[in-house]
Amino acid sequence: MSKYDNLDPRTLAAQALGWEDPSTGAVVPPVQFATTFTRLPDHGQREYFYARYGSPNAVHAEAVLAELEGAAAALSFASGLAACTAPFHALMQGDHVVCAKPVYHGVIAWLEEFAEARGLEVGYFANGDLDALKAAIIPGRTKIVWLESPANPMWSVIDIAAAAKIVHEGGALLAIDSTCATPVLTKPLELGADIVCHAATKYLGGHSDVLAGMLATREVTDFWRRIEDHRRLAGSTLGAMEAYLLTRGMRTLFLRVERQCANAMKVAEYLAAHPKVARVRYPGLKSDPYHAIAAKQMQGGFGGMLSFEPKGGREEAIRVVTSCKVFKAATSLGGVESLIEHRRTSEGKTKTDTPEALIRISVGIEAAEDLIADLDAALARI
């Protein structure tokens, strides 16, 4: 039981767990840049020893996320991809991994380039297909299943509770990349997942100014300790300034996500009715094939991410992206500013099933009317 059980998560986030400086009363933690810490007079070790093992700002950020996710513990990393791949590094040679497709293309790229060289075997299945998930697991050999929900960049949603049951029956751990759902909308650990991952650069940081990743765990197990050891020995610990910015970002997480969800719904509804749009992918739309599942496990909104395909194909899609003025043509997501990109261009040489005409949008906190007017003008150029 958490000592914060009587407080709403919105309060915990806004106050960064109620932190205040014991000597000055400051309500914002200072940035502690020290990389090493003196020992006690008897040469015993203090809470902090050396920054690669953990530092005050990083530990504070981890504590905030752990509370928001209802986790037993959390770890911060130097990037989202460092967090995503840390569980794979903790596996042993000969272990079997199952990964959904689509998920964030960086995870697929790592598995395809490095998993075999590390002695790991990898199987894939279509994200959202529970029968395919069950078929992909090799009982006794599959150690971890990696899912993402909603899944980038086409926003399929998987029933996490049902997936957890299948994964655990197969003797494996379930890890969920919940970057785009955030703890505001979905609590994967409460639904049965073992580990939840966040590319914290995105919604948790929220201002496109910090590179960070985070993992949180339902239980502190031997496997979790191996992930801790990997982070320490690989040197992928989060820096002090980045951890400070991350905590600052999480303080406004609920406000930002609520606004982004509201804006995204308006943009999705506009695009769904537009005669020059062939398809919109957003689980908040009642016409979306994943709407029912999303409505069951996403509380308070359907996220700020959506994708659409204009009629005409790749060249028309790129023309729409380059014609936008309010939306910024850039890769990433989750910031206060709205971003737009032709997704296949951003994915580069990664093997992908992303449609050639797919445009991915990260909806920010601007006036929805301005975003819609910008898209309207861009689509008029088709």
Image (tube, grey):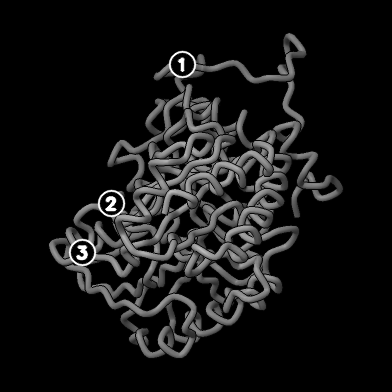
Q: Left of 114 or right of it: where is 51?
A: right
Number of residues whose C-alpha sits closer than 10 Å to that of mark 1, classed few (under 14), some (14–19) or many (20 or more): few
Residue hosting label 1: 33
Instruction: Say if 96 sits above or below 58 in the image.
Output: below
- Foreground mark, 3 or 2, reads 2
Whether residue 186 is visible here, answered yes or no, is no
Label drawn at residue 345: 2
Which residue is more in the foreground, 60 or 289? 289
- Foreground mark, 1 or 2, reads 2
Callouts 3 and 2 close, C-beta under 8 Å: no
Which residue is more in the foreground, 313 or 171? 313
Q: In the rendering, at what x and y percent does residue 131 appear?
A: 46, 90
Please name the amino acid that badge 3 sits on: Glu
User: Residue 365 is drawn in which quadrant?
Assistant: top right
In the picture, the quarter occupied by the C terminus is bottom left
Label 2: element kind? helix
Whether residue 24 is visible here, answered yes or no, is yes
Instruction: Say if 87 sits above or below 251 in the image.
Output: below
**How far apart are the two marked residues, 1 and 2, measured between alpha carbons?**
38 Å
Q: In the rendering, at what x and y percent does residue 72 appear?
A: 61, 54
User: Residue 207 is drawn in which quadrant?
Assistant: top right
Q: In the rendering, at what x and y percent does residue 31 appear?
A: 54, 17
Please name the amino acid that badge 1 sits on: Phe
**How far apart are the two marked residues, 3 and 2, measured between alpha carbons?**
19 Å
Q: Left of 133 or right of it: where is 118?
A: left
Label drawn at residue 336: none
Q: Left of 49 or right of it: where is 270?
A: right
Q: Which residue is pictured at 34% across the width and 50% down the height?
A: 318
User: Residue 313 is drawn in which quadrant?
Assistant: bottom left
Please name the amino acid that badge 2 sits on: Thr
**Of callouts 1 and 2, the N-terminal one:** 1
